[in-house]
Amino acid sequence: MPKTIALVEDDAAIRENYLVALRSQGYKVNAFEDRPSATQAFNEALPDLAIIDIGLKEEMEGGFFLCQQLRGLSPTLPIIFFTARDNDVDTISGLRMGADDYLTKDISMAHLLARIAALFRRSDLMSAPVEQKDELRIGELKVDASRMTVSWGTEPVALTVTEFWMLHALIKHPGHVKSRQQLMDESRMVVDDTTITSHIKRMRKKFIQLDPQFDHIDTVYGMGYRWQL
C-alpha cells in the first residue's frame, strides 16, 4: 500500500504544488489548511508521515501546537516542519517539540523527497534485526546506520535525518576534515554555509546535554569540521 502523508499548509498555491508533486511520487496525500481540520483528521486516523507548516492562518505557531498534539498520539510517527522561517530559535523549538526534521520552503523538491524517503526508511527499519556490520562504535558513540539511530553511552541522541548523515560523514574517517560541501553531498542537501553551521551547532548541543564534557565535533576554521578522538 502507498504511504500516506499529511500536508498541513495554509497557503493554497504552495499546498497544491506539493500535493501534486507528492502524489506524482506515488504517495497518498491528505492536505489541510489549518490546525483544527488536521487535528480532527489525526484523531480519526494517523498518517505515515506529517509535513507541517509552523504558521497556520492566524496561529503564528499553530504548527508547533499541532506537532505536540500529534506526538501525543504517536511517539514515533515521522514529522517534518516545513516553513518559510529559518532561524535557530524556531528550529530548536520545533525539534524539541518532537519534529524529526526542519526544512525551509526554498529547498528543492528533490531534497524534500530525499528527506521523506529517509524518514520512511528509518521507520521501516526500526523493527528490523540489527546487523553488526551496520554499527559504528567510537568510544562512547554508537551509530546504527541501518536504523539511523545514535547513542552516547547508554543514552539515545535525538538527531534529525540531516544531522544523522552529517554525523555519519564525520565519523567514517575520524580526525579527517570534512568540508561544508562534503557534508552537504553526504547528507543530500543543498544549503548555504550558515545552515550547515546551524546543524553542527544543534548537533553539538544535543551531545553536550548528555555529556557536558563532550568536545568531539571540532571546527577547523576555513576548512570544515571533523570528529576529534
Image (cartoon, helix red, strand yellow):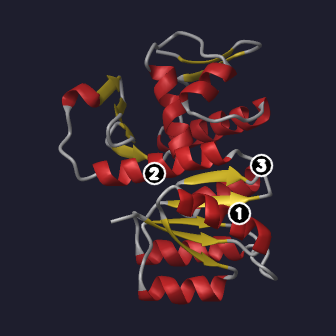
The residue identified by callout 3 is: 106
Query: Local crowd at mark 1 within 10 Å, few (<14), some, or many (≥20)?
Result: few
Q: Quadrant of residue 222?
A: top right
* Rendered view: 7 above or below 165: below
SS under mark 1 = helix
Q: Amino acid at mark 2?
A: Leu
From the viewer's perspective, tell me whether residue 111 is left or right of residue 78.
right
SS under mark 3 = loop
**Horizontal and vertical percent for residue 7?**
60, 70
- State if disc 2 and disc 1 touch (CB < 8 Å): no
From the viewer's perspective, tell me whether residue 193 is left or right of residue 160.
right
The residue identified by callout 2 is: 119
Disc ID at residue 131: none
Q: Could you tell me which residue is drawn at 62 percent across and 43 percent down?
A: 111
Q: CA distance from mark 1 to mark 2?
A: 21 Å
Q: Earlier in the sequence, mark 3 or mark 1?
A: 1
Q: Could you tell me which residue is drawn at 37 percent across and 45 percent down?
A: 155
- State if disc 2 and disc 3 touch (CB < 8 Å): no
**Horizontal and vertical percent for residue 131?**
20, 34
Q: Earlier in the sequence, mark 3 or mark 2?
A: 3
SS under mark 2 = helix
Query: Camera-side residue: 157 or 84?
Result: 84
**Horizontal and vertical percent for residue 39?**
56, 85
Q: Amino acid at mark 3?
A: Asp
Query: Local crowd at mark 2 within 10 Å, few (<14), some, or many (≥20)?
Result: many
* Rendered view: 80 above or below 227: below
Residue 208 appears in the picture as rendered: no
Residue 147 appears in the picture as rendered: yes
Q: Earlier in the sequence, mark 1 or mark 2?
A: 1
The residue identified by callout 1 is: 17
Query: Local crowd at mark 3 within 10 Å, few (<14), some, or many (≥20)?
Result: few
